[in-house]
């Protein structure tokens, strides 16, 4: 059966069905909050075991998430969601039928294994079936369903708490699992995933049903498919900036204490003076605030943008956490703590909780999106596991007030850091987002790759200038890197003249000797040689996948000496220099000898070069050439 009607209706139905995974996630993580006091009373759990009961699912999620990305990239988004949902159903039944603490923890761990996959696969899928103008709202629909699932878990706990029926609290979670499994037969696979696997016709049909374009916007520089599905090529494709940013946000969301406030809401409110039932009622109010805030986010995320909501939400959370600290220290707990907790969770729902899932679904290129979203999700749940496990022991040792003071410090620092490093992604096609950074050098399939050490891999001007400064500058004179950066492009002789004139320096030996003896200058500053970041991304991505060589017109002793100080020297299978070919032979012989040593036909070799002479030589050898100058024009 397939949905009929307009593409907009189909798209909305598809997003709604997929976002049931959020309902499943919200109920699965929130239900333990209401069940925990009853389980503790029945089994006499210590604070550490209570933490384990809450965090068992989070540990399972952290363990499953990394591999789920590879599975989603290989088999598709829907099969992973469907399989994870079946595992969730099994874990829910096992938890409800638990005969002791061990079996309860095992069932919760099984639930977590499924949540690790659905928590990233659902927003990933929704982001790929949504048009850019509505992507924020549709992906945040998943977050809305999470908050509804949390609220539903609080309501069920309130209804069943008088009877002590914690097993039924857990068993109700089977309902959203069955709903999602049935819905999987109504929706199309992601057009982005189909296109990345070479199913062009199926991708076009799916895109037509959903009413979205097949290209998503201008294409970035041709890069070829990622070789393999591992993290190394995926990270190389996305770039270190985006990988680190995604991981940082993934971890910071939980270091704020947001999910801890949700998981332990009844316990927090009970410890502030409310009864157990009153704590659950307070949790329902918290859940209502959470849902209302997420509705606002769904309506405003594509209008206001990701960055203002993230930073503003973190700022309000930091101030509110300080308020909870002050209330605790001054003895004004109870209703005051409940009110501040509502504000804290509301700010989190508007900011980091909603923005995180949208943001990580946007910042990675499609070929690496599954692998890197799963990596970020794994970090997300690992941080959640640590924070959830340590919350009750922290409260016991520090008090609730000082625990929230710690969260306030982390949250405030996070807001300041993201204000500096987090760019806006609102309304931009997925295929163009990562091009805000300098474009990645193409990674081409070939039998081998050849690099020029003293040109392509090394910022040779930087190394030479540092060497000249060491020779020219008298004791105590410091020449900052920025001084050299401002004069990039000057020849060696011009740089020496500028140094002498501007700094009134006296050369310790003749300028002619310095210019002629560049090799010695290189050796003097071997430790200062800095490889190009963009080129190294290619080297790191292809390490172990294809043979690689340094093929340089420089002197062997110089290149060997400078390579000796580089941690990536083992990435190269051979080194060919001007000393390896007969004196007077043309430059193409260096490339041909490198190909011969790597047992590769020249036509199957790719050369990364940054000079006209090197490009001409590589072409003369019959090799594919990539001119890296457009990519390395900006200094790494």
Image (spheres, rainbow, N blue to C red):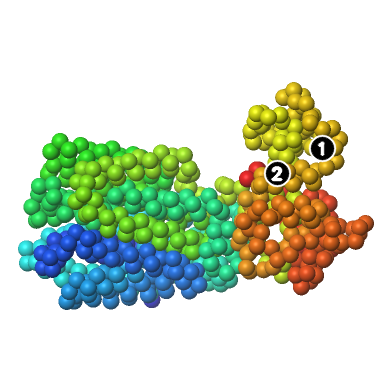
State which quadrant residue 547 falls in: bottom right
Q: Position of residue 19 (x, y in %)?
A: 34, 62
Task: Pick whichever, 313 or 13, lies toward us.
Answer: 313
Q: Position of residue 228 (x, y in %)?
A: 57, 69
Residue 467 vs residue 116: left or right? right
Mark earlier in primary sequence (1, 2): 1
Q: Residue at x 69, y 63 (%)?
A: 572
Mark number, residue 525: 2
Mark number, residue 384: none
Q: Residue at x 65, y 28 (%)?
A: 476
- Is residue 594 visible to the viewer in this orientation of the structure? yes
**Residue 87 versus residue 156 in the image, above or below:** below
Task: Pick whichever, 570 or 476, lies toward us.
Answer: 476
Q: Residue at x 32, y 47 (%)?
A: 256
Mark number, residue 514: 1
Residue 486 vs residue 216: left or right? right
Q: Residue furthest right?
A: 584
Q: Secondary structure at mark 1?
A: helix
- Is residue 177 visible to the viewer in this orientation of the structure? no
Estimate how packed mark 1 is, as few (under 14), some (14 to 19) or many (20 or more) residues with alpha carbons within 10 Å: many
Residue 109 vs residue 438: left or right? left
Q: Position of residue 518 (x, y in %)?
A: 80, 43
């Amino acid at each position: 059966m397939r949905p009929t009607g307009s593409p907009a209706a189909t798209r909305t139905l598809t997003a709604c069905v997929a976002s049931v995974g959020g309902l499943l996630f919200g109920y699965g993580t929130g239900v333990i909050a209401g069940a925990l006091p009853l389980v503790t009373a029945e089994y006499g759990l210590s604070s550490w075991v209570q933490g384990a009961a809450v965090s068992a699912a989070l540990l399972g999620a952290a363990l499953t998430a990394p591999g789920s990305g590879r599975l989603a990239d290989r088999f598709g988004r829907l099969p992973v969601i469907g399989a994870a949902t079946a595992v969730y159903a099994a874990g829910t039944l096992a938890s409800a039928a638990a005969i002791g603490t061990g079996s309860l923890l095992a069932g919760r761990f099984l639930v977590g294994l499924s949540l690790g996959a659905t928590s990233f696969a659902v927003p990933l899928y929704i982001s790929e079936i949504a048009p850019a103008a509505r992507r924020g709202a549709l992906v945040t629909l998943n977050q809305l369903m999470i908050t509804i699932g949390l609220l539903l878990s609080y309501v069920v706990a309130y209804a069943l708490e008088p009877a002590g029926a914690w097993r039924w609290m857990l068993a109700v979670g089977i309902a959203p699992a069955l709903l999602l499994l049935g819905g999987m037969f109504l929706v199309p696979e992601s057009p982005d995933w189909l296109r990345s696997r070479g199913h062009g016709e199926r991708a076009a049909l799916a895109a037509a049903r959903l009413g979205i374009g097949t290209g998503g916007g201008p294409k970035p520089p041709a890069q070829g498919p990622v070789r393999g599905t591992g993290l190394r090529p995926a990270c190389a494709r996305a770039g270190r900036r985006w990988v680190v940013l995604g991981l940082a946000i993934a971890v910071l969301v939980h270091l704020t204490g947001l999910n801890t406030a949700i998981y332990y809401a009844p316990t927090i409110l009970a410890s502030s003076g409310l009864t157990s039932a009153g704590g659950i009622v307070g949790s329902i109010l918290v859940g209502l605030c959470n849902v209302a805030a997420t509705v606002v986010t769904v309506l405003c995320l594509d209008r206001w943008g990701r960055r203002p909501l993230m930073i503003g939400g973190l700022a309000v959370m930091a101030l509110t956490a300080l308020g909870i600290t002050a209330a605790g220290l001054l003895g004004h707990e109870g209703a005051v703590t409940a009110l501040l907790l509502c504000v804290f969770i509301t700010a989190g729902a508007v900011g980091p909780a909603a923005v995180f899932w949208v943001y990580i679904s946007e910042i990675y290129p499609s070929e690496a999106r599954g692998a890197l979203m799963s990596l970020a999700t794994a970090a997300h749940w690992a941080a959640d596991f640590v924070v959830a496990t340590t919350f009750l022991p922290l409260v016991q040792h520090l008090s609730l007030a000082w625990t929230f003071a710690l969260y306030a410090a982390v949250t405030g620092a996070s807001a300041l850091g993201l204000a500096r490093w987090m760019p806006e992604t609102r309304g931009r096609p997925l295929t163009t987002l990562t091009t805000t950074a300098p474009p990645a050098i193409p990674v081409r399939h070939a039998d081998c790759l050849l690099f020029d050490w003293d040109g392509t891999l090394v910022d040779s001007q930087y190394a030479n200038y540092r060497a000249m400064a060491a020779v020219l500058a008298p004791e105590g004179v410091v020449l900052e890197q920025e001084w050299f950066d401002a004069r990039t492009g000057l020849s060696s002789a011009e740089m020496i003249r500028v140094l002498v004139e501007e700094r009134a320096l006296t050369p310790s030996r003749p300028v002619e000797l310095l210019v002629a003896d560049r090799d010695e200058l290189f050796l003097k500053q071997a430790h200062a040689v800095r490889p190009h970041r963009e080129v190294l991304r290619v080297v790191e991505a292809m390490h172990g996948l294809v043979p690689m060589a340094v093929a340089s017109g420089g002197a062997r002793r110089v290149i060997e000496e400078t390579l000796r100080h580089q941690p990536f020297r083992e990435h190269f299978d051979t080194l060919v220099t001007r000393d390896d070919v007969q004196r007077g032979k043309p430059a193409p012989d260096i490339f041909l000898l490198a190909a011969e040593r790597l047992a590769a036909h020249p036509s199957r070799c790719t050369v990364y070069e940054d000079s006209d002479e090197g490009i001409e030589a590589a072409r003369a050898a019959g090799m594919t050439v990539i001119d890296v100058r457009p990519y390395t024009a900006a200094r790494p």
